[in-house]
Image (spheres, helix red, strand yellow):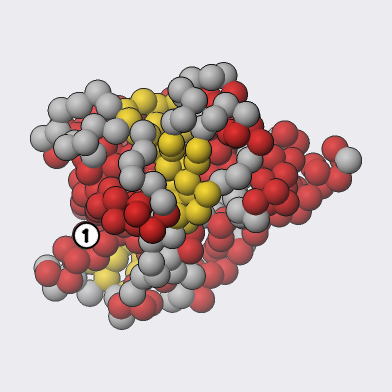
Amino acid sequence: MLGPTVLEPLTVDWAAAQGVEIAVLRLDLIDPLLSGNKWFKLRLHLEGSRQRGCTGLISLGGPHSNHLHALAAAGQRLGLSTVGLLRGHETSTPTIIDLRRFGMHLHWLGYGGYRERHQADFWGAWQARYPRYHCVPEGGGGLEGALGCAMLVEQVEGALPAFGWQAFDAWWLAAGTGTTMAGLVIGERATGRLVYGALAGPGAHRGGDQVAQLLREAGVSTDRYEMLEASGKGFGRFDRRLAQFIFDIEEQTRLPLEPVYTAKALLALRQHVEAGRFEPGARVVFVHTGGLQGRRAAEPLLRQLRRRHC
Ligand SMILES: Cc1ncc(COP(=O)(O)O)c(C=O)c1O
């Protein structure tokens, strides 16, 4: 179902100047729709729903949600009905248009209604309304989501020889709920390589707490991970500097980024490298977690910010 594991060198002057080598794990290339970390976060949820004989999937997210986009596409591909619970009031975005095209049934919860998702009785009413649907936590999270990502470690290990590396020192990736990061930490429990998560939202998004919670649930005890603040102007917001960074990287390396997760994570890596926080000779795997579908809505502002800069 998925394409091969692709590692590509990121040849940029700021890494070369510090003697740091970066390999990009191109998860954005593994599938046209279930790309990035999404397939890994969803795979055990999908398997579980099949084992339980579920007829559909229900989950929640915002109007640009990469997670709902992947869930709707997976449902369509696997013949499962899908329901999306949306933050805010009805609006049209490229993502929403796709969700409808993939056959997802949408409910708009408003902002207050969406905030209720953490309450204990939130899912009960939806389960009563959609019996035999599997409820997937926000962002494809939970232990199933994390365990699905743990296999990335093995996959990258397998791809290293063809890439010409025998070993590497650290992982670097964008973090939202922290599920993907927790998966890597779980997968790394034998080797203990450091996993860095660049938080796309302010600490209030509780990414760090969630990683610790997921590790507890998985029975993994380690401190070989670090979360860094990378939200810049705030979750989903970006400025001229980030816009320019995206276009510069694209021109120099052909690597496509989007402004919510991957560009912020790579910019944070650049700052870390430039601050000399990696030893010369260090090798880092940067995980491209996908999300490029979400860039469509941001494109006009990205271009406008760049024009103003020129
Ligand atoms: C493109 C992209 N990168 C990174 C993340 C963050 O992943 P996680 O929530 O597992 O930390 C997300 C959110 O799911 C995402 O859409």
Q: Nearer the viewer, residue 144 or 246?
A: 246
Whether 239 is drawn above or below 4: the answer is: above
Q: Residues within 10 Å of mark 1 (few under 14, many from 20)?
A: some
* Percent x, y of residue 55: 22, 74
Q: Quadrant of residue 80?
A: bottom left
User: In this view of the protein, can residue 69 be seen by the observer?
Assistant: no
* Percent x, y of residue 203: 44, 25
Mark 1 sits on what residue? 44
What kind of residue is marked 1? Answer: Leu
Whether 109 is drawn above or below 178: the answer is: below
Name the element at disc 1.
helix
Q: Quadrant of residue 167?
A: top left
User: In this view of the protein, can residue 151 be seen by the observer?
Assistant: yes
* Percent x, y of residue 274: 59, 24
* Percent x, y of residue 232: 60, 29
Mark 1: C-beta under 8 Å from nearest atom of ligand 1:
no
Q: Residue at x 54, y 30 (%)?
A: 19
Q: Looking at the rendering, in which quadrant would you find the C terminus?
A: top right
Q: Quadrant of residue 224?
A: top left
Q: Nearer the viewer, residue 31 or 120?
A: 31
Q: Looking at the rendering, in which quadrant would you find the N terminus?
A: bottom left
Q: Residue at x 23, y 60 (%)?
A: 45
Q: Nearer the viewer, residue 186 or 38?
A: 186
In the picture, measured across the screen, residue 57 lies left or right of residue 299, that is: left
